[in-house]
Image: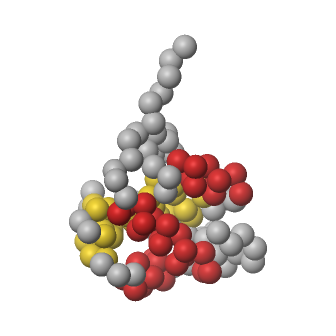
Amino acid sequence: MKGSSRRGVTFETVRRTALSLLNVEEGTAWGFPAFRTGGKLFLCFREDLESIVVRASFEQRDEMIAADPETYYTTDHHRNYPWVLARLSKLHPDAVHELLQISQRSAAQKKPRARQIRSS
């Protein structure tokens, strides 16, 4: 993802970008704006509409967070699932299309399993 010259994006920019992808349906999930491909959720807005939640492999998520922790993050709720969160105010406009494509491809793949937490 692009990391320089942060300008942020709007709800509408993300919405238009999602709808520009093939086979995307707009709807809601848990009462918030969401987008599906082939019936599978790949993008959902957070309650405050200031962050998005997108599918990504655990490896992709970890790489994004390591490269740009001001933009990409996770929460305790999402930690064991293949999702990454992105702050709209920090997300570079050039990164939106690529991020949503990654998420859409991830949703189209076989459903990944949650990470198992090991206790010692």
Can residue 77 be seen?
no
- Which color scheme is applied? secondary structure
Left or right: residue 89 compared with residue 100: right
Q: Nearer the viewer, residue 30 or 117?
A: 117
Give the answer, above or below, for where 104 lies relative to 16: above
**Percent position (x, y) of residue 81?**
43, 44
Q: Which image quadrant: the C terminus?
A: top right
Q: Please, which residue is most extreme toward the front here?
A: 110
Give the answer, above or below, for where 96 lies relative to 86: below
Using the rendered view, name the quadrant where residue 32 is placed.
bottom left
**Percent position (x, y) of residue 38?**
26, 68
Q: Nearer the viewer, residue 76 or 20?
A: 20
Residue at (50, 52) in percent of width and height: 57
Q: Nearer the viewer, residue 51 or 61?
A: 61
Q: Which image quadrant: the N terminus?
A: bottom right
Can residue 116 be seen?
yes
Left or right: residue 26 compared with residue 114: left
Residue at (49, 42) in percent of width and height: 79
Using the rendered view, name the quadrant where residue 78 is placed.
top left
Give the answer, above or below, for where 87 lies relative to 112: below
Give the answer, above or below, for where 69 lies relative to 34: above
Q: Please, which residue is most extreme toward the right here?
A: 4
Residue at (69, 59) in percent of width and height: 68
Left or right: residue 99 compared with residue 63: left
Please count the marks in the image. Answer: 0
Residue at (58, 49) in percent of width and height: 59
**Percent position (x, y) of residue 53?**
45, 60
